[in-house]
Image (tube, coloured by chain):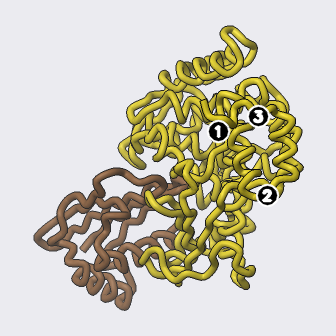
Amino acid sequence: MRILFERTGGFAGLKLKAALDEETLPSAQARRLRKLLEESHFFDLPLRLEALTARPDRFQYRLTVENDNCIHTVQASEDAVPPEMRPLLDWLTATARQQK
Amino acid sequence: MPASFIIPTYILQSIIVNGDKRQQAMAWATLTSSEQFRGERKILTVLAPLASTATGTKRRTVYDARHGYSLPGRLVRGERDRKSKDVAVNEAYDGCGATFDFYFRVFGRRSIDARGFRLDSTVHYGMNYDNAFWNGRQMVYGDGDGEIFRRFTVALDVIGHELTHGVTQCEADLDYRDQPGALNESFSDVFGSLVKQYKRRQSVEEADWLIGKGLFMPGIKAKGIRSLKEPGTAYDDPLLGKDPQPGHMRDYVRTSDDNGGVHINSGIPNRAFYGLASRLRGHAWEKAGQIWYRALCEKLHTHSTFADALNMTARAAGELYGLNSLEQKATREAWAEVGL
């Protein structure tokens, strides 16, 4: 499983990116990632999660997950993120920071 | 015509110094209303230091999200409550106060909606959250990640920036994407910076013209997040990369990120404002700020572009200071300098 994570926008307008490969992740981290993906029902989420009007200084997320047999991309503005997806985004944000 | 218009200026001044709270507020509102404003602009500067008691109804509340994502969170400080032990709570409270005072004393505006809207802030939002935002109803501040960013209440211009998003929403209501979005961002940076300059009584030359100074952890190679004076020079750091802001139309960035690069292309109108302020000298809020504020409140609209901002600030300058006045010419020059 491979993951591309990107966060843009926010007050500072800084881009945060990470590319993860399950095979190269420590096993504890890989398990955590799988669990977070399941709990957020990632593969059932729509392609776009957007609020009616764009809100100032909020983050924009783009997340692509490539599994054995499928690939799915979700583009989400922060204020439209469902609560179940939050822990996943928090984890990816922290991981992306460490990758820098 | 309201009766207040016939009260002579010197009496209004006296009320501001000697009246009770309600009278002071009324006198300020009169003195700073646009009709009386044109002839009496100097008074603002003369009186500003005296006016520490003359405020409108300022109502602030600060909430604590306790690192969660629910808003507003638990109420921790209301207007006139004692100081908190929590520095972020006090910074949000004081920063809101300074921003309210700026809008009231410089523009005669009572709060975000000009009708005394209660100013709600939430601190400690989210986990290692490196952001601050206005959600349409309130301000929200994260604590930063502790590696790159510190808590976002640390910089007064950030608080002024967020509150100004509320003002913009009530006035021009600039659409938050592409050029209108970059203008929206720019107005927040401009007035955010002016809140700080006004608080410190700094002239154009004395001000740092930086947004988010002090927001970065030690060791990060950054003066701030954005520079209005020299867009593109705020930071250059291995972790952050280089400040991508353009200061001229030829470098306008076309991107789908960040609602069309609203935090990037805001560098262009930011520099136009600095260009105007530096031509007019003195305190930037006295003339340049008045021109920009008038354009925001009376001229611009949801779909306004940079070219509209040029035309409308020039028109505002003409109305405030006269056709072909030095101020109007300086406004056009400042935009020409950034390629408009």
Sequence-first disc among 3 and 1:
3
Dot 1: element: loop
Task: Look at chain A in the picture and name its colour.
Answer: brown
- Residue at x 51% of width, y 70% of height: A97
Specify whether residue A1 is in view: yes
> For mark 1, what is the residue?
B231
User: Can you say which quadrant of the picture contains the C terminus of chain B?
Assistant: top right
| Type of the residue with mark 3 | Ile
> For mark 2, what is the residue?
B20
Viewer-proximal residue among B109 and B231: B109
| Type of the residue with mark 2 | Asp
Specify whether residue B221 is in view: no
Sequence-first disc among 3 and 2:
3
Task: Please check whether the numbered discs 3 and 2 fall on a single chain.
Answer: yes
Tell us which disc is closer to us: 3 or 1: 3
Viewer-proximal residue among B277 and B8: B8
